[in-house]
């Protein structure tokens, strides 16, 4: 299985996904049995850790991810945090259900230098019958410096 999908056929069939819990799916992704989200290739991050209620992505923003002033675009922070927080929620989703982001918020605490290796950690705070909430952080992989925090509300479907 490719690390990232090259075409829609690289993703598992809907019936296969429906037969897996969110934790099973995330573990399969970590082990390379299902591809990671293609946005990870574009944005320069990949999955490095999965446990119940907690997911970690590792990434490095490149010059291609900068805004008109040469700083890392806020959308980069938001994209990796959305993946981290949403996938943390996913670890608690039972078989036959799925989720989608309803809303998320990002607070950038300091500028992230281009080429800096970071960890984006998502932690699930609560999962009810129809919604779930999580929070996340982007931290320097070497010195643990905080670059951004985030929160999300997800809709549970199915």
Image (cartoon, helix red, strand yellow):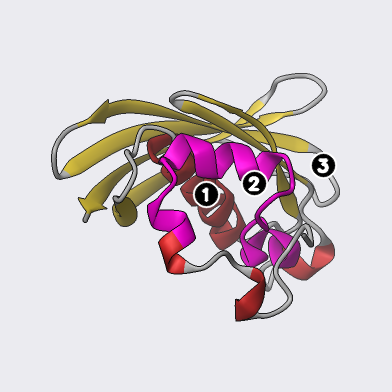
Report whether 61 appears left or right of 100: right
Going from N to C along the chain, the mark reached first, 1 or 2, is: 2
Q: Position of residue 150 (x, y in %)?
A: 43, 39
- Quadrant into which the C terminus falls: bottom left
Callout 3: 10 Å neighbours few (<14), some, many (20+)?
A: few
Residue sitting at 36 percent across and 47 percent down? 105
Residue 1: which quarter of the image?
A: bottom right
Q: Position of residue 138 (x, y in %)?
A: 60, 35
Callout 2: 10 Å neighbours few (<14), some, many (20+)?
A: many
In the rendered image, residue 148 lying in the magenta stretch gets the answer no
Residue sitting at 65 percent across and 54 percent down? 34
Residue on which the image places disc 3: 116
Q: Are circles 1 and 2 on residues that touch, CB within 8 Å?
A: no
**Could you say which disc has been placed on residue 83 in the image?**
1
Decide: is 1 above or below 136. below
Decide: is 43 above or below 132. below
**Could you say which disc has been placed on residue 29 in the image?**
2
Q: Secondary structure at mark 3?
A: loop
Q: Position of residue 70 (x, y in %)?
A: 75, 64
Q: Which residues are magenta?
A: 16-43
């Amino acid at each position: 299985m490719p690390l990232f999908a090259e075409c829609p056929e690289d993703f598992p069939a809907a019936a296969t996904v429906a037969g897996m819990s969110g934790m099973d799916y995330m573990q399969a992704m970590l082990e390379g049995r299902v591809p990671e989200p293609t946005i990870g290739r574009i944005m320069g991050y990949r999955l490095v850790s999965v446990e119940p209620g907690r997911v970690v992505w590792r990434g490095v923003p490149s010059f291609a991810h900068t805004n008109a002033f040469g700083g890392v675009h806020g959308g980069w922070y938001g994209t990796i945090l959305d993946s981290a927080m949403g996938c943390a929620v996913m670890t608690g989703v039972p078989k036959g259900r799925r989720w989608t982001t309803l809303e998320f918020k990002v607070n950038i605490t300091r500028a992230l230098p281009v080429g800096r290796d970071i960890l984006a950690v998502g932690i699930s705070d609560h999962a009810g019958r129809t919604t779930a909430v999580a929070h996340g952080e982007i931290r320097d992989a070497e010195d643990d410096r905080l670059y951004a925090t985030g929160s999300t509300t997800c809709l549970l479907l199915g």
